[in-house]
Image: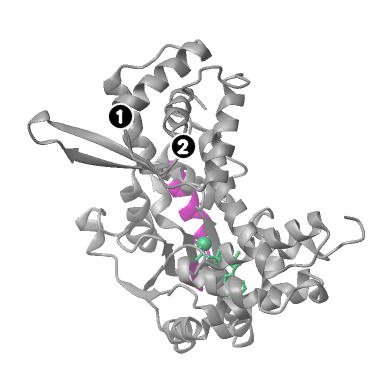
Amino acid sequence: MLQNTIVLNKKYLDDEQLDRKEQFEVLKEIFDVNVRSKEISELSSHFAPMFKDGHPVHLSLLGKTGTGKTVTILYFLNMLKALCAKNKIQVKYIHLDLSIPKPCFRALNDLACLLNATKRYKRGISLDELMSRIEDKLKPFTGYFILFVDEIDHVRRDPDSFLKFLIRRLPQSVRLKLVVIFTSNKLNWQENIDPRIKSFLKLNEILFDPYNALDLEKILSIRIGKALDKKMIERGVVKKISAISSRTHGDARKAVELLSKSAHIAERRGTGITLDLVDKALQEIEQDKYVAMIKSAPGQLQAVLYSVLSFSGTKPVNTSDSYDVYCSFCAQAKTRALTQRAFSDMISELDIYGFIKTRIVSQGRYGRKKEITTSLPKEVSDRLKEIILLEFDLEILNNPELK
Ligand SMILES: Nc1ncnc2c1ncn2[C@@H]1O[C@H](COP(=O)(O)OP(=O)(O)O)[C@@H](O)[C@H]1O
Ligand SMILES: [Mg+2]
């Protein structure tokens, strides 16, 4: 493993593990402008009035995750700031990162901190006072103030107050020219806003399309140049990753993750990154996702999943058969079994998470029954069973029915 180094510079592969600031330092160097040039030129024309003393309206950037909204805007704002400095235009921008959902108070508190209007987190002051502090801090400023609210739909509890402050109250109490940039993964984030606020919200929208294979190829190639030993990558690997990623999601973050997973597997096995390893990596990512999900699930849900997965094969299973297995599982794990009704609810929940599929089948005058099928690959389902047994401290179930 020591001799087989493919990853030369890890930080260019795990940008999710760096904090936002570090992430941006790293990304600034490898952000591919060409693949977002349409969006950047739309942004440029949106902000152009600033150079004629005009006041651009607010902006909403929409698009799925990993389409580069955050990196593009941060890149653009940095450029804009430099250009303004050259033209002696006063501008300030703030990135309010709401990628972790939080209530209105917390979000405003974050904003206040970014503005140095409060030191650290303030507890026990009223929302109104928090707002006043932000206003006081901004009062002396007369230039353009660009507030980048990243993932606006994550303002939980009282998003209306949050918007009302930004859109109505703040502009009335300060002299600066406020431009808010909202981003969201949800196209309809404005749908549930109080109509009285909505009517004040004049927005220009820019849509970020998912990356196509060509874009992803460019993004990945830059990444490879920075992070990996090129000699260790078989021809066609980048094309393959780009093709898979553009077909399934067009998310650059996930494409980079697939590249990084492939590199790590290759290092572990002492080989280069081959086309086959990409498939292997894809499988592992998928598996990790299910494993993480089931590990954090409540015990009963795990037991229910075990009972369904213990029927090998692709034949549909009906609820009452799997309920029997579930009951013997609970007996051995020494936990109380749920009623069949509650069991059935759990089955529906597993369906929502994508572990299994259920279908209601009519049996004529014998009523209806629920049929369950699992579509997980065998390795994944075996791994899940293993984990669930471990969680319940069971070695192997000594019931012939449960194999
Ligand atoms: N044009 C690009 N050049 C290089 N990397 C990119 C580009 N666009 C996106 N990425 C990668 O994808 C990840 C997700 O981008 P991000 O801007 O956070 O997406 P969004 O905010 O739309 O969810 C980034 O961390 C970066 O790794
Ligand atoms: Mg983002």
**Residue with the mark numbered 2:** 312
In the rendered view, does 388 fall on the left or right side of 365? right
Residue at horizontal 70 percent and vertical 77 percent from the top: 222
Quadrant assignment for the N terminus = bottom right
Residue 182 appearing in the image: yes
In the rendered view, does 336 fall on the left or right side of 232? left
Residue in the foreground of this view, choosing between 153 and 388 = 388
Circle 2: element type: loop
Q: Quadrant of residue 338?
A: top left
Q: Nearer the viewer, mark 1 or mark 2?
A: 2
Residue at horizontal 31 percent and vertical 36 percent from the top: 348
Check the image and report above or below for 149 versus 79.
Answer: above
Check the image and report above or below for 64 versus 125.
Answer: below
Question: Is-magenta flag for residue 136?
Answer: yes
Bounds of the magenta span?
A: 129-146
Check the image and report above or below for 211 versus 108.
Answer: below
In the rendered view, does 233 fall on the left or right side of 199? right
**Residue with the mark numbered 1:** 319
Q: Quadrant of residue 206?
A: bottom left
Circle 1: element type: helix
Residue in the foreground of this view, choosing between 25 and 232 = 232
Residue 31 appearing in the image: no
Check the image and report above or below for 396 versus 151.
Answer: above
